[in-house]
Image (spheres, helix red, strand yellow):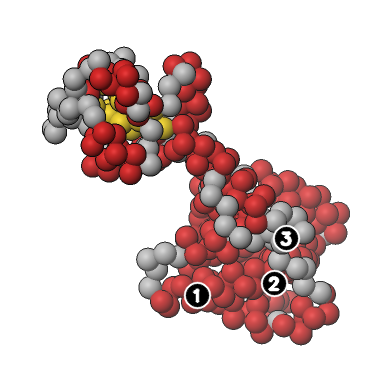
Amino acid sequence: MYQIANAPEKDTLVSMRTLLWIVLCADFIFLLMIGSMKLEQYNMSEFAFKERVKGFPAVEVKRWKRLFQLLPRVYLLQSVELVIAATIFVTVLTSLKGSLVAVVGGLLGIALIRVVSRLRVVQNKATELFETTLDVVLRTTELLQPLWWILGVPARSVAVRPETTNELLDQLRKYPATVLDNTQKQRVQTVIESQTKTVKDVMTSKRMVTSVKPHSTLGPVLLSDLQKTGHGYFPVYEKKAEPEGLLDISDLSDIHTAKQRQTVRDIMNSQLVWVEEETSIEELVQAFLQEKQYLLFVRNLDGDFSGIVTVADLLKQLIGAVKD
């Protein structure tokens, strides 16, 4: 009779222990997911945020904007969740195995979570779960506003490391005048942009080049026409043909020399220096210094004449046109 009377109590105890083990395992998984979630990936500048949500539906943009604004509070929520989950883990383990085993088990659990949370597959799963439940996270964060008042919310970090050149330039433009004035900002921006630009970005395209035909007759009329352009050097070539030379207007203005020649071809310099469109700005500087020329001819990837680049073009890029 005694054993029969205690059978229900024994079954209840077994059920309770089973339930506690289930709670313990679920809590461990929850701890693992929270510990693996890297909120730093959402700590971005306003520029990076705008780039990220480009093309998103309006509803999604609004959703991510809430996260962008509430991120410091979401950090706190993550910390609170970790504390609560760890407390539950130790408490349940104490009920199952005793306090000493709970302490040892808690330390081993934390160590295991720290190791497993470094796995990329676990981090990806944690991120996927976080973004799936993002609306719940944001709603919870907003409901716990009184708690954040008590704990204090850290200010959003403004010193976000830029991930792209465009993001760096965006941050540069926002620096106050006490750090960099407009002239300094422009110069820094010019230097940064020069590192990624090529001849193609600073050259004058073929269709914009003022040229001279090789058979043009030398004389006051030609000199007058060329002087009106304001340029000092002119590529020499027939329409739709490769350049044959380079005319220096100072040679043409020497009337005595001009009288001894009949056409542009007779006075032009036929030693042409070429660079590729993909030549970097640094390599272009070296080309000008080495060749000691004011104007260089440019070829495209097909090897065809595509334009010219001058020392003035280079200086404009390196120094920049500063606007107040």
Q: Quadrant of residue 244?
A: top left
Structural distance between the alpha carbons of marks 2 and 1? 15 Å
The reply, left or right, for residue 86 in relation to residue 301 is: right
Residue drawn at x 50%, y 41% as measured from the top left: 317
Q: Are marks 3 and 2 in contact (CB under 8 Å)?
A: no
The reply, left or right, for residue 52 in relation to residue 182 is: left
Structural distance between the alpha carbons of marks 3 and 2? 32 Å
Q: Quadrant of residue 45?
A: bottom right
Amino acid on which the number 2 mark rests in the picture: Arg
Q: How many other residues sit within 10 Å of disc 3, few (<14), some (14-19) or many (≥20)?
A: few
**Location of mark 2 (residue):** 73
Residue drawn at x 42%, y 78% as measured from the top left: 59
Residue 186 in view: yes
Please tell me which residue lies in front, 160 or 183: 183
The image shows residue 214 at horizontal and vertical percentages of 18, 25
Mark sitting on residue 63:
1
Give the SS element for disc 2: helix
**Which badge, 1 or 3, is on the more N-terminal residue?**
1
Q: Are marks 1 and 3 in contact (CB under 8 Å)?
A: no
**Location of mark 3 (residue):** 177
Structural distance between the alpha carbons of marks 1 and 3? 34 Å
Amino acid on which the number 1 mark rests in the picture: Arg
**Which badge, 3 or 2, is on the more N-terminal residue?**
2
The image shows residue 64 at horizontal and vertical percentages of 51, 70
Amino acid on which the number 3 mark rests in the picture: Ala
Please tell me which residue lies in front, 216 or 276: 216
**Which badge, 2 or 1, is on the more N-terminal residue?**
1
The image shows residue 229 at horizontal and vertical percentages of 33, 43
Q: Quadrant of the N terminus?
A: bottom right
Q: Quadrant of the C terminus?
A: bottom right
- Mark 1 or 3: the one toward you: 3
Answer above or below: position of 299 versus 184: above
